[in-house]
Image (cartoon, rainbow, N blue to C red):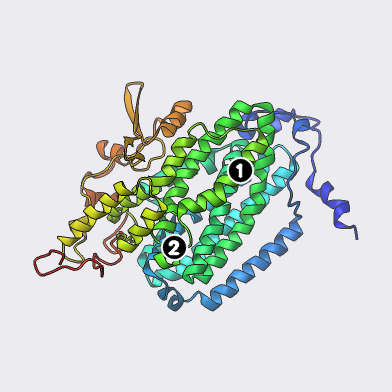
Amino acid sequence: MLKREDWLDLARKLDWEYSYVREDEVFPEAASGRPWLPHSEWEDWDEPFRTSYAEYVANQHAKDASIHAVRDAVGRLADYRKLDPLWTNALKLYAATFPLAEFAAVVGNLRAARFGRDSAWRTMAAYGALDELRHTQIPLLVMHELLRWEAQFDWTHKFFHTDNWVAIAARHMADELLLTSNPIEFAVATNFVFETGFTNLQFVGLSALADRVGDRLFEKMITSIQTDEARHAQIGHPVLAKVVAHDPEYAQYLLDKWFWRSWLFIAVVTGVSMDYLTPLERRSQSFKEFVDEWILDQFLASLEGLGLKKPWYWETFLDSLEIYHHRIYASAYTYRATVWFDMAVPGPDERAWLREKYPRYWDAMDAVWEQITERWRRTDPGVEMGVHGTAIVTFCDLCQLVLCGGTPPGNSARTLSREGRKYIFCSEPCRWIFEKEPERYAGHKDVVKRVLSGEAPGNLIELVLRSFRLTQETWGKDVHGGLYPWLVRDRVGNTS
């Protein structure tokens, strides 16, 4: 039998010259991406894992067996009922936003498996498609069991099939990132920026959090997924290096665009989970500390090695790291009936911890929570709508998230007039992305525009029921019903 080193390169590098069609017909630029280069420019493409299919199958089988073993041991409903209620809502947030996005990534990887410009790249993309299908199936399987306990876990599958405002934003990004990008943009945006820059390390942080709260199954699931991400994320670096060599301006644009779009998504999911939905006594570091330690150093080192610059809005990003996810959480809490998971008001100890971790702007956020607390003081426990927003808020015309960007000294919202229509954006980077490719984004309708055009009801409760497809059983509530040990009411509704 041949040794592995004798046959692997031949199996991975199986390209040939075409005799009856041109290369640009087999790999048209519209499908393969730009810059279009002959295969001779791509034939040195390589990645460090160099996995054969037999090795891939054996490794994946072992990982799946390990997850099933943990699920059999600690994946029963009784095990989940022992977890802190805050953490179970972090699970609902993660479970809804990731599995079907991973399924969309199957499509992006399969496109690269056909139109990637080197056979080794195409092989890795085929493995990536199988990975992402696995990342879809495992959370769907695990979370489905929890439906017997809480109906909100139904959103693991339901989320992307609704017009919920968070789903609109997530779908807007996922469709462009995963379903419509050509293999070159997909490799830079997904494999390099999103996976290498954010999610690969995010899974490290989430698995550590799961360990601290005692959620062994989620820890194992995330760790297993992370090992797949670490492999197929390696597609991105050699593709980006080639784009840098032939079109550095385009490479910088793709980097700048997708770092910002990825950042907003990660801030919403991971920032909220780490700083608000993890029990205080189980937190080892803040979201900001995690990003500083695990993401920024590695990402900036990668850029330097490729000869790329920091995104032009770097100072804006650093400012948003201090406050953006706090504003998103306060907005979501104020309109919690519009989401599928429950939330809590941070108490005095949590607010002191947040002040220590985010001293720069916490005074402004503390005032928001004090106002919400005062409303609960004047409202009986369980009367959710007494401490809830009623008017429909405005959304960004690029990222589709609520307009809550900027810092206390300055609102970051920006406007634009184009072809007789006015647009509003949460930030300068969002407006910049829109102006670079307006044909991609100009026709999209956010929640407000759907209401104004008659496609969605203007009454908030009707909007939640009909467009967002939530019910009174599944819409978000205060996890304690406003009944906090640090908030004591007397008979006339005041705090003693």
Position of 245 with respect to 102 (left or right) is: right
Position of 76 with respect to 410 (left or right) is: right
Q: Residue furthest left?
A: 492
174, 455: nearer the viewer: 174
For badge 2, the amino acid type reads: Leu
Q: Quadrant of the N terminus?
A: bottom right
Return the x and y of residue 9 as percentages of the image width and height. Answer: 83, 47
Residue 102 visible in the current orientation: yes
Disc 2 packing (10 Å; few <14; some 14–19; many ≥20): some
Q: Which residue is mark 2?
A: 91
Return the x and y of residue 374 as percentages of the image width and height. Answer: 19, 57
At numbered mark 2, what does the secondary structure look like: helix, strand or loop?
A: helix
Q: Which residue is mark 1?
A: 192
Q: Residue furthest top?
A: 419
Query: Residue 420's image quarter?
Result: top left
Q: Quadrant of the C terminus?
A: bottom left
Return the x and y of residue 256 as percentages of the image width and height. Answer: 53, 34
Q: Residue shown at 52%/68% (left/top)? A: 211
Circles 2 and 1 in contact, beta carbons < 8 Å = no
199, 102: nearer the viewer: 199
Query: Residue 185's image quarter?
Result: top right
Query: Residue 400's image quarter?
Result: top left
Q: Residue shown at 63%/56% (left/top)? A: 228
Position of 493 with respect to 82 (left or right) is: left
Mark 2 to mark 1 CA distance (whole Å): 26 Å
Q: Residue furthest right?
A: 1
Return the x and y of residue 394 as percentages of the image width and height. Answer: 29, 39
At numbered mark 1, what does the secondary structure look like: helix, strand or loop?
A: helix
For badge 1, the amino acid type reads: Phe
Earlier-in-chain disc, 2 versus 1: 2
Residue 157 visible in the current orientation: no
Q: Residue shown at 53%/63% (left/top)? A: 208
